[in-house]
Amino acid sequence: MISYFLKHSYIVLLLLLLLITITSCSDETDPVIPPSEHFEPEGWVIRDATTKPILVVWQGVIQTTWNSTSVPDTLYAPLNALSDHFTVKFLDINKNIINPPADADHQFGWLITDPSKLTIIQDSPTDWAFHLKGLIIGTTTLELQVMHLGHVDVKTPKLPVIIREDTTAYGEPIGLRLSYEENGTVLAMATDLISSGSLDVAKDSLTDHIEIEFYDDQNRYYQPEYPLHSLDFTVANSSIVQILPEAGEPWVIRVKGLATGSTTVTFRLMVAGVAEFVSFPINVNVQ
């Protein structure tokens, strides 16, 4: 009886050991597919739309000179408007500029000390780029981050930000206006929900130059930075009308009538392949 019990106890013990081994193996990371590595740059470079450095961090310290040239140690955000388009680059141990990590495990992140004063606007949520938008005049600080699988891999020190009035700045586009470039006559306007007016042209004819302007929630009209921004459009019936961009003038078009009838055109403001604004369809008539 005892030998029977010992024999079966030995079998049970072997099964338990086998189960523990299998469980522990299943918890191990697949050695064939290693996890994504942490990104560990030595510094940060924030650049404007001309690629000029506007703030440099080296080994955790904000720099006041870089490559023998003075650089600001503070960022500026216009009140109720967008700053320039800022891009994020990094520095390796040799102070060479390197690109952000391209894998899906890393994302651009940030922490604003006082979010009642400042916000960040991105043209595309996957870009390592941003605009600053001031909400209240004053000062705050901003920490930029490299996120890795939900946690912070690396971060800047607290970057000073001053929010101030800037009459040359503008906000996010909420609508557009089309007018004759020569005399300013308004032909059509559109938001993303509604449009008014129309583009009219005779069959087999071309209109004069038509200028496109965007406007923000403060009713400020502007034409965005080019080539960072570009214009795209779709004609509902391309057998009736053709839209012709004007060479050397990125915000000017002409309309050519192909066949008598009516159709619509939809305009898009593009940033790095992403539509920042899409207009409601605008009527086009060919007589």
Image: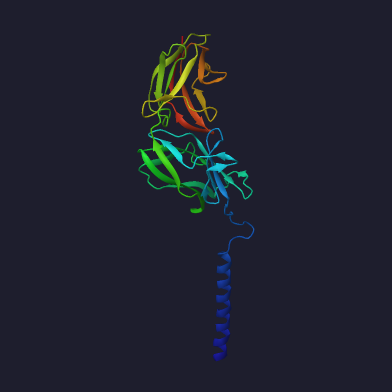
Q: Position of residue 221 (x, y in %)?
A: 41, 24
The foreground one among 267 and 95 is 95
Q: Is residue 176 above or below residue 49?
A: above
- In this rendering, the count of numbered labels is 0
Residue drawn at point x = 55 percent, y = 76 percent: 16
Q: Is residue 271 above or below residue 65?
A: above
Q: Is residue 128 above or below residue 205?
A: below
Residue 280 in sight in this render: no
Scheme of image coloration: rainbow
Horizontal side, residue 145 vs residue 136: left or right: right
Residue 225 in sight in this render: yes
Q: Position of residue 60 (x, y in %)?
A: 52, 51
The foreground one among 55 and 154 is 55
Residue 18 sits in quarter = bottom right
Q: Position of residue 210 (x, y in %)?
A: 48, 16
The foreground one among 269 and 66 is 66
Q: Position of residue 146 (x, y in %)?
A: 52, 49
Image quadrant holding the N terminus, namely bottom right
Residue drawn at point x = 48 percent, y = 39 percent: 130
Q: Is residue 279 above or below residue 85?
A: above
